[in-house]
Image (cartoon, rainbow, N blue to C red):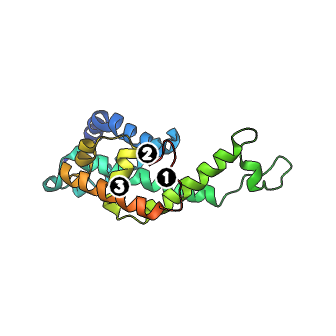
Amino acid sequence: MTERTPRALEAFYDRFSRRAYALARRICVDETIAEDVVQEVFLHVWRHPERFDASRGSVATWLMTMVHHRAVDAVRREATRRKYTVPPGEDGDEWSAQDRLPSGPGADEAALDRVVAGHVREALGQLPTEQREALTLAYFGGFTQREVASIAGVPLGTVKSRMFTAVRTLRGLLDGRVERGEGTA
């Protein structure tokens, strides 16, 4: 995107918007947040086209990397916002944490799943950025290792090494905190 005209942005958007939205949606899950991420990224491209450096990779890699980073940031912001926001009850009082858990059979399992997810998130936060991003793209984004390598702009072997090391580190961090059972690593 060297030409800064509305027509150039329109062509650029037409070419990459679906891919950008698909990536943002995989990471954010929420459609609205994913749409906001894509809008922010294309606005950034429009305002700062000079930030693209062809020596570091293709324009698609640059764009998808920005989408990935912004989507992860958006998910973190939303998680933080939800962590500190308690929805009001019907009578105006705040709900207790117990009221937010699903009732009926399986409520205890849902609560345990949330605890395990918290431990996993905490452990992921302790990984080096490159390892965390590789795992996030692969496990939460649904990308193959080859696709992760393309998005990150690194060789496939590097992605494999990062993921292997990250999984080994996570196992060590989670040992004793998370029980391994059926369907868990």
Which of the two labelled residues, at mark 3 and mark 2, occupies the earlier sequence position? 2
- Label annotation for residue 91: none
Which of the two labelled residues, at mark 1 and mark 2, occupies the earlier sequence position? 2
Judge the density around disc 2: few (<14), some (14-19), many (≥20) Cα neighbours within 10 Å: many
Of badges 3 and 1, nearer the viewer stands: 3
Relative to residue 107, is residue 141 drawn left or right? left
Judge the density around disc 1: few (<14), some (14-19), many (≥20) Cα neighbours within 10 Å: some
Front-most of residues 17 and 132 = 132
Of badges 3 and 2, nearer the viewer stands: 3
Query: Could you tell me how many numbered marks the image carries?
Result: 3
In which quarter of the view is residue 6 placed? top left
Cα–Cα span, label 1 and label 2: 8 Å
Image coordinates for residue 123, horizontal then vertical, percent: 46, 62
Residue 31 versus residue 80 in the image, above or below:
above
- Residue located 39% across and 45% down the image: 139
Relative to residue 52, is residue 85 drawn left or right? right
Q: Name the residue under label 1.
A: 75
- Locate the N terminus and report the quarter of the image it occupies: top left
Cα–Cα span, label 3 and label 2: 11 Å
Q: Name the residue under label 2.
A: 27
Judge the density around disc 3: few (<14), some (14-19), many (≥20) Cα neighbours within 10 Å: many
Element marked by disc 2? helix
Q: What residue type is labelled 2?
A: Ile
Front-most of residues 147 and 109 = 109
Q: Mark 3 points at which residue?
A: 133
Q: What residue type is labelled 3?
A: Glu
What is the residue that sits farthest to the left in this orientation? Answer: 55
Q: Are marks 1 and 2 in contact (CB under 8 Å)?
A: yes
Element marked by disc 3? helix
